[in-house]
Image (spheres, rainbow, N blue to C red):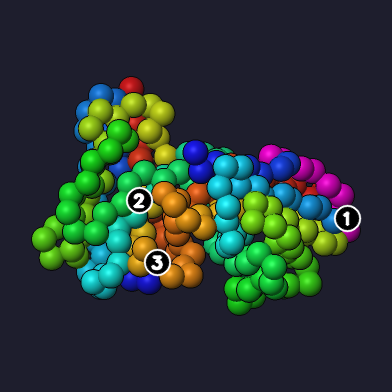
Amino acid sequence: DAKTTQPPSMDCAEGRAANLPCNHSTISGNEYVYWYRQIHSQGPQYIIHGLKNNETNEMASLIITEDRKSSTLILPHATLRDTAVYYCIVRPQTGANNLFFGTGTRLTVIP
Amino acid sequence: GAVVSQHPSWVICKSGTSVKIECRSLDFQATTMFWYRQFPKQSLMLMATSNEGSKATYEQGVEKDKFLINHASLTLSTLTVTSAHPEDSSFYICSARGLGGEVYNEQFFGPGTRLTVL
């Protein structure tokens, strides 16, 4: 699986948009970009995933650059409950793949 | 939908005893379940891949005789930590990969089990 690079930590003011970047310059053509988050002492929670088009769901938006070498997860209106570690993972959608978690980005939403 | 449960959510045991952790997919079937371990302030590390009806595949450095995995059905996998020691204290998390339909090949995580060995 391709490797990802994320900043170790970020702060965001409550109510503002949180933009979390991820670099995946070695991503392969069949690999999707997945985002999970882990709130303290809980299991990871799926947020969103995409291949090359931008995606949006009730939790977040995913913006993938045209060359697919980087992406940004956007939480449009961050709340205190969004404080968590956010993991960007690239993997094929099919096949016997587990998920390789890097160090992620620790997002702290500040009141 | 796509809920994974773990039991117990936390356990404290004495050194030398064995502890069993259950992972269940509640509303979908999963031929493959994964077991992760997470130490404080660290990321999740894959321990083993569990396939229904067959032996688990362990990651390098994980002792298969110490961490026994049984995957007896499409909705249940168990991890038994045998002869637990304080260094086995950790947060154990399972995930289940969907067999078909909308959950096909997607992974869903359990809430985790915190093990403390005294």
Tell me the element at label 3: loop
Q: Chain letter of disc 1?
A: B
Horizontal and vertical percent position of residue A56 = 23, 41
Magenta segment range?
B9-16
Name of the residue lying farthest toward the front? B101
Distance from label 1 to label 3 (Cα)?
39 Å
User: Taking the image as drawn, is residue A59 in sight?
Assistant: yes
For marks 3 and 2, the one nearer the N-term is: 2
The local secondary structure at tag 1 comes to loop
Graded by Cα atoms within 10 Å as few (under 14), some (14 to 19) or many (20 or more), the crowding at tag 2 reads many
- Amino acid found under the numbered disc labelled 3: Thr
**Which residue type carries mark 1?**
Thr
Q: Is residue B14 positioned above or below A16 on the image?
A: below
Q: Which mark is nearer the camera, 1 or 3?
A: 3
Tag 3 residue: A94
Q: Is residue A90 left or right of residue B30?
A: left
In this rendering, do the residues under marks 1 and 2 share a single chain? no
Occupied quadrant, residue B85: bottom right
Q: Which of A107 and B80 is in front in this view?
A: B80
Seen at 26% across and 73% down, the residue is A28
Query: How far across and how far down the image is residue B51, in percent?
Result: 63, 67
Q: Name the residue under label 2.
A: A35
Q: Which amino acid does label 2 sit on?
A: Trp
Q: Residue furthest left?
A: A66
Q: Quadrant of the C terminus of chain A?
A: top left
- CA gap, disc 1 to disc 2? 37 Å
